[in-house]
Image (spheres, rainbow, N blue to C red):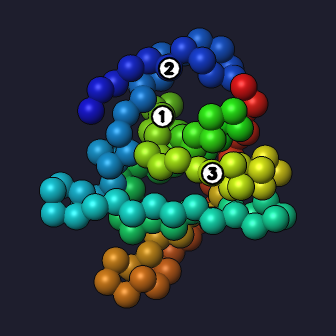
Amino acid sequence: MTDEPNQTTAEGPQDRKVGNLTDFVYGTDGTGFLDIEVAVNEKGKVVLFHNRPFKHDIAWFEFDLGTNKLDFVLDDGDIRDAGLPLGQDVAKYMQNSHQILMVLLNDETGEAKEGNYIPLIIHKT
């Protein structure tokens, strides 16, 4: 993992670290993997399914409409890239969203274990 300061935020230049998301979930120490899927409907309701619990709380998400990049922002201001490309069909509906429902799935059964809403900030570059 490489930490690099992000100098292009909506608030202005800041020293925020950008790194790999798998470093911040349990169970990806070589024996497991992080599976993330994003679903959105025409009304802009977004659900992010994931199979590993996060070690730190997600403070908010940031989505850039120009690059279709989804970032996880932790409580300490560190940014973690979701590591998956989101298509234009997803992006066009996300622009109407203000929050994302995160749903932790049971890795063995695929059933939902828990979920919570996280704020979403949309950027247009």
Q: Are marks 2 and 3 in contact (CB under 8 Å)?
A: no
Of tags 1 and 3, the one toward the viewer is 3
Q: Depth check: 12 or 42 in front?
A: 42
Residue at 44% of width from left, 39% of height from top?
80
Query: Which residue is the site of mark 2?
Result: 6
| Residue lying farthest to the front in this orientation | 88
Of tags 2 and 3, the one toward the viewer is 3
Three-letter code for the amino acid on which mark 1 is drawn: Ile
Q: Are marks 1 and 3 in contact (CB under 8 Å)?
A: no
Query: Which residue is the site of mark 1?
Result: 79
- N-terminal-most mark, 2 or 1: 2
Residue at 69% of width from left, 55% of height from top?
90
Secondary structure at badge 1 equals strand
Residue at 37% of width from left, 87% of height from top?
109
In the rendered image, the vertical position of residue 55 relative to residue 11, given as above or below: below
Q: Which mark is residue 87?
A: 3
- N-terminal-most mark, 2 or 3: 2
Cα distance in 3D space between marks 1 and 3:
21 Å
